[in-house]
C-alpha cells in the first residue's frame, strides 16, 4: 500500500497526476492508438495535444522503506511541458485515432484533416459535398467518415475513399463493432448496421433520440446509445429490436461496456448506473443491476470503464473524479471537485493512464503505478 498523505499532506492526484490549464473548456478527449498522445478537444474546435510519456513517472518516484516495508512516493520536482495547440478546426464534430500515432479530425467545410501526435495539421483532399458529421476509427488504420447522409471508408493514407454509400438523413454517430466487421450509423431516428467489407446495410431499426455516445458490447450482440433526451437506447442485434430506458435525471452523455466485469455502465444519474451483461434491461425484463459506488446529490456526468480491469472511472458535475470496482460500493477519490464539471474521461489503451477534461479548461492525466492495482 502506498502512503500518499503524510508528511506533505499531498493528494493522490498531486502525486500521480499531471494537470494543464487550457484556454478553452475541454469538450472531448481521445488517446492515439499507441497511447503516446492525448488529444483534448477545446470549445473553439482546436485540439490541445499532450504527451503521455512522463519524465517523472510515478514508478520512478516510489521508494520502499526497508524497516517497515511501506512504499512512499515523492512529489514532482520538474515543470510540465506545455501543450501543443492546433489551429481551430471542427474537432467537436468528429475526432478519432488514425494509424498508430495520429488523429482524424473534422475540418472546415468538407475537408478531413490528419493531426500528428506533435500537432502538425495536414488537410486531406475533399471527399464529399457536405461537412463531416461523424468519424470512427476502423481496424487496419482506416477511418469511417460521415458527411450528412454520405458514408465513406477512407484508406489509411486518407487520399481516396475505399467505399461509399448513401443513407437517409444525417449520420450523427458512428461506431465499429469489436471484431471490425460491422459499422453502426446512427442519426435521424434510426440506426443502420453495415458490413465494413462492402458497406452493405444488414438492418435498419427505429432509434429515437439524439445519440451523444455509442458503444458495442464485447461480443457484438448489443449496441448502446446514450441520448441527450435523458434516455439510454439498447439495440439487440440478435433479436433485431431496440428498447429505451427513459427518465434518467440528466442526459446520458457517456456510457461503456466493461469486458472484465461483464457490465454496461452509464452516466446521467446520481450514481454510476450499471447492469450485468448479457442480462440487460430490455422490454419487460428488468435485467440485473450492479450497485456501483455511492449515491449522492451530484450528477455523474461521465463514466469510463477500464479497458482490462473491473474498474470504472466516474466524473461528477462538481469536478470530482473517483474510481470504483464495478458491483461494489467502494470508491477511491482521484481528483477533488473544484466546482467545474468533468466533461470527458478516457483511458489509455493499456489502462495505465486516465485522462480527464473539465469545463474550466483543465486537462489532467493520472498515471497509475503498478503497485496500485495489486
Image (cartoon, rainbow, N blue to C red):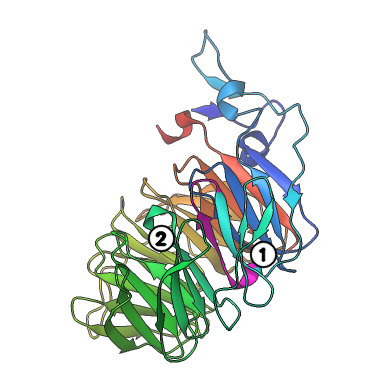
Q: Secondary structure at mark 1?
A: loop
Q: Residue 167 appears in which quarter of the rendering?
A: bottom left
Mark 2 neighbour density, 10 Å: few (under 14) some (14–19) many (20 or more): many
Residue appearing at x 30%, y 78% in the figure: 235
Quick one: quadrant of the C terminus?
Answer: top left
Question: If you read the primary sequence from the N terminus, does the residue marked by circle 2 or circle 1 appear first?
Answer: 2
Residue 168 position within the rendered picture, expressed as x and y whole percent measured from the top left: 42, 91
Residue 319 appearing in the image: no
Residue 133 position within the rendered picture, expressed as x and y whole percent measured from the top left: 55, 78
Q: Which mark is residue 263?
A: none
Q: Residue 208 appears in which quarter of the rendering?
A: bottom left
Residue 56 position within the rendered picture, expressed as x and y whole percent measured from the top left: 65, 27
Q: Secondary structure at mark 2?
A: loop
Give 295 or 333, whichever is nearer the viewer: 333
Residue appearing at x 44%, y 42% in the figure: 350
Provide the residue designation for mark 2. 138
Provide the residue designation for mark 1. 341
Taking the magenta stretch, the answer to whether it contains residue 97 is yes
Taking the magenta stretch, the answer to whether it contains residue 193 is no
Judge whether 359 appears above or below 186 on screen: above
Q: Residue 225 appears in which quarter of the rendering?
A: bottom left
Residue 90 position within the rendered picture, expressed as x and y whole percent measured from the top left: 67, 70
Query: What range is drawn magenta here?
Result: 91-101
Residue appearing at x 75%, y 65% in the figure: 88
Amino acid at each position: 500500500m502506498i502512503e500518499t498523505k503524510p508528511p506533505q499532506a499531498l493528494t493522490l492526484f498531486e502525486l500521480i497526476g499531471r494537470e494543464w490549464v487550457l484556454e478553452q473548456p475541454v469538450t472531448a478527449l481521445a488517446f492515439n492508438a499507441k497511447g503516446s498522445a492525448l488529444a483534448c478537444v477545446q470549445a473553439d474546435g482546436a485540439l490541445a495535444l499532450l504527451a503521455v510519456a512522463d519524465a517523472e513517472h510515478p514508478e520512478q518516484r516510489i521508494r520502499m522503506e526497508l524497516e517497515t516495508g511501506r512504499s512512499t512516493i515523492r512529489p514532482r520536482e520538474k515543470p510540465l511541458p506545455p501543450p501543443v495547440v492546433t489551429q481551430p478546426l471542427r474537432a467537436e464534430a468528429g475526432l478519432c485515432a488514425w494509424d498508430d500515432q495520429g488523429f482524424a479530425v473534422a475540418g472546415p467545410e468538407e475537408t478531413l484533416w490528419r493531426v500528428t501526435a506533435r500537432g502538425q495539421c495536414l488537410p486531406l483532399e475533399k471527399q464529399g459535398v457536405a461537412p463531416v458529421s461523424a468519424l470512427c476509427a476502423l481496424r487496419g488504420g482506416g477511418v469511417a467518415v460521415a458527411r450528412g447522409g454520405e458514408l465513406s471508408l477512407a484508406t489509411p493514407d486518407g487520399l481516396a475513399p475505399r467505399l461509399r454509400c448513401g443513407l437517409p438523413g444525417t449520420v450523427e454517430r458512428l461506431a465499429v463493432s469489436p471484431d471490425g466487421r460491422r459499422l453502426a450509423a446512427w442519426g435521424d431516428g434510426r440506426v443502420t448496421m453495415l458490413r465494413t467489407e462492402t458497406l452493405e446495410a444488414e438492418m435498419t431499426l427505429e432509434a429515437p433520440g439524439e445519440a451523444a455516445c455509442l458503444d458495442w458490447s464485447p461480443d457484438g450482440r448489443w449496441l448502446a446509445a446514450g441520448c441527450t433526451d435523458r434516455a439510454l437506447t439498447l439495440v439487440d442485434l440478435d433479436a433485431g429490436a431496440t428498447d429505451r430506458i427513459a427518465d434518467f435525471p440528466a442526459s446520458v452523455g457517456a456510457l461503456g461496456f466493461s469486458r472484465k466485469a461483464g457490465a454496461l455502465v452509464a452516466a446521467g444519474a446520481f450514481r454510476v448506473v450499471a447492469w450485468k451483461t448479457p442480462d440487460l434491461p430490455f422490454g419487460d425484463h428488468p435485467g440485473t443491476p450492479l450497485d456501483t459506488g455511492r449515491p449522492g446529490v451530484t450528477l455523474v456526468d461521465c463514466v469510463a470503464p477500464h479497458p482490462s480491469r473491473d474498474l470504472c472511472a466516474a466524473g461528477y458535475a462538481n469536478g470530482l473524479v473517483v474510481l470504483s470496482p464495478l458491483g461494489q460500493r467502494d470508491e477511491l477519490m482521484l481528483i477533488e471537485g473544484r466546482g467545474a464539471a468533468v466533461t470527458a474521461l478516457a483511458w489509455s489503451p493499456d489502462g495505465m493512464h486516465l485522462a480527464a477534461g473539465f469545463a474550466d479548461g483543465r486537462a489532467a492525466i493520472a498515471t497509475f503505478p503498478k503497485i496500485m492495482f495489486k
